[in-house]
């Protein structure tokens, strides 16, 4: 992405809309346009254009959570036990984004729990952050079967929801954990070894200004490859310096 905004919706707008189905029960306080959009999703279909329409109608994190819980446009969701929305403080200056929930995350309904979550907590603590001073989510909110990587189509469907999630939180800094999250958010095909350690910008129409973005290794990778921890530490120091400088 670099300094230039990336239009992630050009391809999505060409997606065919599903035929209308009966609307789900309206949750209390749920925005009417979101409910109407959810009603257009054909169960079992992969419809990124509809996802973009639904996400754009969400005006709060609560509405976005309900929209995801009611979304039936991705078969991946049917095999998951939970919609893993987020954890931490939505008012925090730092937003952390991983790839997708694992088995334990799916069971608990929270991102980054289990061994990788414990390591993430230690990584955040090393720069003075915790789950009360950071906000944590994933590109894909549903666990892929057998912990496989999400497919490009699955990521494409989820990106409008993630983009709206970022807009609503509006953090000072984004940290992307792992190559899948980095590729999705930055819209770049480079691997994590090339992307990490560099500042990028995330921009979208719903943001007041571009957000600085840094990619680093996923905690699960660091558990398998301890020798990479020194590079992740370097990346985290860059985040700490950025926050301390006030130049966001």
Image (cartoon, grey):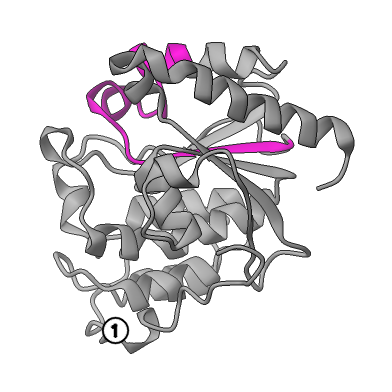
Quarter of the figure with residue 118: top left
Looking at the image, can residue 99 be seen? yes
Check the image and report above or below for 10 versus 50. below
Residue 175: percent from left, percent from top: 57, 39
Residue 131 position, x and y percent, is 61, 21
Q: Is residue 39 left or right of residue 144?
A: right
* 87 displayed left or right of 178: right
Judged left or right of residue 65, residue 126 is right
* Quarter-of-image position of residue 202: bottom right
Residue 66 versus residue 188: which sits nearer the camera? 188
Q: Position of residue 21 (x, y in %)?
A: 23, 77
Which residue appears at 34% of the width and 56% of the height? 70
| Identity of the residue drawn at 77% across and 63% down | 209
Name the quadrant of the N terminus. Answer: bottom right
Local SS, label 1: loop
* Number of other residues with Cα within 10 Å of mark 1, as a class: few under 14, some 14 to 19, many 20 or more: few
Q: Residue at x 40, y 54 (%)?
A: 183
- Rendering coords of residue 90 (x, y %): 66, 38
Pick whichever, 232 or 165, lies toward us.
Answer: 232
Identify residue for label 1.
15
Would you say residue 114 is visible in this rendering?
no
Range drawn in magenta: 93-119
Report which quarter residue 96 is drawn in. top right
- How many marks are shown on the rendered structure? 1
Give the residue drawn at x 35%, y 76%.
50
Classify 81 as above or below 205: above
User: Would you say residue 95 sits in the magenta stretch?
Assistant: yes
Residue at the limit of the structure toward the right, as seen here:
246
Q: Judge whether residue 176 is colored magenta.
A: no
Is 7 positioned to the left or the right of 83 in the image? right
């Amino acid at each position: 992405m670099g300094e230039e905004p990336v239009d992630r919706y050009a391809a999505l707008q060409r997606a065919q809309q599903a035929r209308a189905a009966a609307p789900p029960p309206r949750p209390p306080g749920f925005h009417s346009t979101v409910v109407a959009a959810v009603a257009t999703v054909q169960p079992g279909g992969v419809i990124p254009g509809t996802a973009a329409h639904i996400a754009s109608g969400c005006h709060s994190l609560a509405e976005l959570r309900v929209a995801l819980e009611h979304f039936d446009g991705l078969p991946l969701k049917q095999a998951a036990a939970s919609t893993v929305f987020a954890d931490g403080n939505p008012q925090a200056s730092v937003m952390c984004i991983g790839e997708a929930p694992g088995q334990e995350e799916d069971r608990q309904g929270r991102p980054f729990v289990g061994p990788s979550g414990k390591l993430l907590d230690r990584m955040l603590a090393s720069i003075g952050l915790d789950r009360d001073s950071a906000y944590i989510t994933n590109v894909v909110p549903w666990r892929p079967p057998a912990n496989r990587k999400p497919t490009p189509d699955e990521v494409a469907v989820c990106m409008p929801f993630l983009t709206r999630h970022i807009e609503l939180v509006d953090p000072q800094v984004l940290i992307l954990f792992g190559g899948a999250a980095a590729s999705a958010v930055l819209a770049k095909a480079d691997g994590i070894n090339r992307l990490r350690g560099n500042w990028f910008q995330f921009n979208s129409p719903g943001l007041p200004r571009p957000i600085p973005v840094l990619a680093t290794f996923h905690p699960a990778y660091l558990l398998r490859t301890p020798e990479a921890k020194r590079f992740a530490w370097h990346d985290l120091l860059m985040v700490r310096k950025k926050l301390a400088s006030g130049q966001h």
